[in-house]
Amino acid sequence: MAPVPTERDLRLDLFRGIALWLIFLDHIPSNAVSWLTIRNYGFSDATEIFVFISGYTAAFVYGRAMQQHGFIVASARVLKRAWQIYVAHVFLFAIYLAEIAYVAHSFDNPLYTEEMGVLDFLKNPDITILQALLLKFKPVNMDVLPLYIVLLLWFPPMLWLLLRTPSLALVTSATFYALTWWFDWSIAAYPNGTWVFNPFAWQLMFVFGAWCALGGAQRLARWVNSPAVIGLAFAYIAFAFCIAMTWYFPRLGAFVPKFVGDAIYPIDKTNLDVLRIVHFLSLAVITVWLVPRDWSALKSPVAWPAIVCGQHSLEIFCLGVFLAFAAHFLFTEISNSLLTQITVSLFGIIVMVGAAALVSWYRTMERQGPGPRPPKIKPGYAGGDA
Amino acid sequence: MTGRVLFSLALLLLAGTAWAEEPAQCRVAAHLVERDFALPQVNRAIAEKHLEILVVGAGSSLLPGSNGIKNAYPARLQHALGEALPGVTVKVTTDVQVKRSAGEMAKSLAPALAAEKPALVIWQTGTVDAMQSIDTDQFRAALDQGINIARSAGADVVLINAQYSPRTDSMIALGTYAENMRWVALQHEVPLFDRFSIMKLWADLGTFDLYSPAKKLDTAERVHDCIGRLLADLVVESAKPDEPHAEGGR
């Protein structure tokens, strides 16, 4: 059985924290600050980082539980987590409905008669709310948590396999991914179409993260640190950057040979396009090369805000979704000046950090105090969630 | 998308007061109009002094009210082309109905083309597909089909993407549909009129208040007038790709 590492890698928390900030910025509609986020400069975005690190930490936390307490106990914990995420999703949906209902009220601009049709779902709350509870009706930007729920449901057997024969588990996951592309497997959404993030495809990123946590990263180390791989990673990121620039300056598109365009487009986010995976891997290779595990800055106050957010990812992710709604509400009802956009973006991140610090403080207090909860047995992954 | 807007803002700052003196406010977005692909049929029609255009679209190609047809962008396009092409008879007909997806429009394209025989089909789509979250493969296939039908009927094609609608921004995921439209346009070498970015720039610069929830028909009419003018620029300049043209304000 593969050993589960004992000490948490702070780099994971750091980059998950940063991914949470980026997701928040990207989720605010019409936000000039989202110009800064990585999705504008290449194929992959913060979602890959978030899912990969979530897989990594899930293996880390539940892997140990499975080794110490067996399959049933660990699976029960994973399912409890999935339930918590479901509750969080429904809670966010309620807030979304409140925001939409308010924004929709008195919206009568003749320029947008067609677009107003999107509010028609408010007229059929019986169907809409039921479909939302079934995770079939998902408003824009509320697709990550349902993905996470399905990934966790699939995780216990995968983790069992990962702990025994990690390579077979990874091959199984990759095969499933390939079959999904081959047979167009997907989950239906309401009223039309499919889930924005296809769990059958995205499970690869999650399982790959888990595989890395359970010894895969060490096995890859020789490759990851080779100058040739690092060079290739830089070359691919440069290529993706050049392609991304043609999205903003269409005239540059003339310099992209037709066969390249035919080969790469459309870049499928729903089914986790291979181009996106390679882009994420390239970023990961460069990150591991630039930021060593024992980097002193990881323990400095500069990195702390992102790390503390990354350590409480579910709470902070949900808060981010809520703050993005609130920001859109502010833009429509009060002001959408550039200054407001920058202020709101910054303020949102400060609120996320503050909330993460508060959650951290609660956890420490509950662990130390004579409260009803027993203290955690292993201080090794103190403060971290799956 | 935002990157493009910021770049545009920077360009405008560099350009200084050049655009401020331009009488039509819509000109601030003129540099966002692409002119990369030729429109040979339009070119020929202009040479023959008779240009017929068919606008195929959904709800955002319409304006409400008794003067809606007169003030919506297809009619404004006809007006602007008439001014830009003296001596050429310009006739813009429309096949516009609310709530139609790209697939539905592609289906009604053949009969409409048979009736009108236009040199150019201007196809506005994307919004309804995004609202109904139509499968993007289907959306792309519909665009391919429509473009092929129009071309085999001897017409050039210009695509128009969705409007920028800040109030419903958090409710309609336009992004993937816009990307797919851009890709299909590139593949078929068809000009894409990027209405989304143009309107976003107007909103960012305060040219038009697109956040307003109120029933203000005058703003809507001015927006459509501007879209008609910029579309006319695209048509005229793409039809004559060999002649050198000045960038930006004219």
Image (cartoon, grey):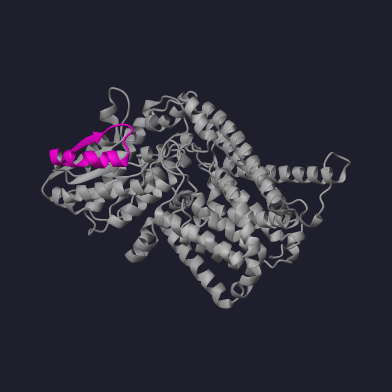
Residue in view at x 76 percent, y 50 percent: A383
- At 89% from the left and 41% from the top, the residue drawn is A370
B97 in the magenta segment: yes
Q: In front here: A61 or B22?
A: A61
Task: Tell me: A329 left or right of B144.
Answer: right
Q: Is residue B71 visible?
A: yes
User: How many labels, in total?
Assistant: 0
Q: Quadrant of residue B37?
A: bottom left
Does residue B239 appear left or right of residue B47 in this picture? Answer: right
- The front one of B177 and A208 is A208
Tell me where the magenta segment starts and ends, as one range: B90-115
The quarter of the picture where residue A358 lies is top right
Q: Is residue B211 magenta?
A: no
Is the residue B192 above or below the residue A169 in the image? above
Choose between A174 and A223: the one closer to the eye. A174
Residue B25 visible in the snapshot:
no
Q: Quadrant of residue A66?
A: bottom right
Q: Is residue A152 left or right of residue B141?
A: right
Residue extending farthest to the right is: A370
Residue A141 position in % (x across, y down): 53, 42
Task: Return the x and y of residue B99 as percentages of the image width and height.
Answer: 33, 33
Residue at 63% in and 67% down: A216
Picture coordinates of residue A204, whole percent (x, y) = 54, 58
Q: Position of residue B192 (x, y in %)?
A: 32, 49
Which residue, as the protein is rendered here, is positioned at the far bottom?
A: A227
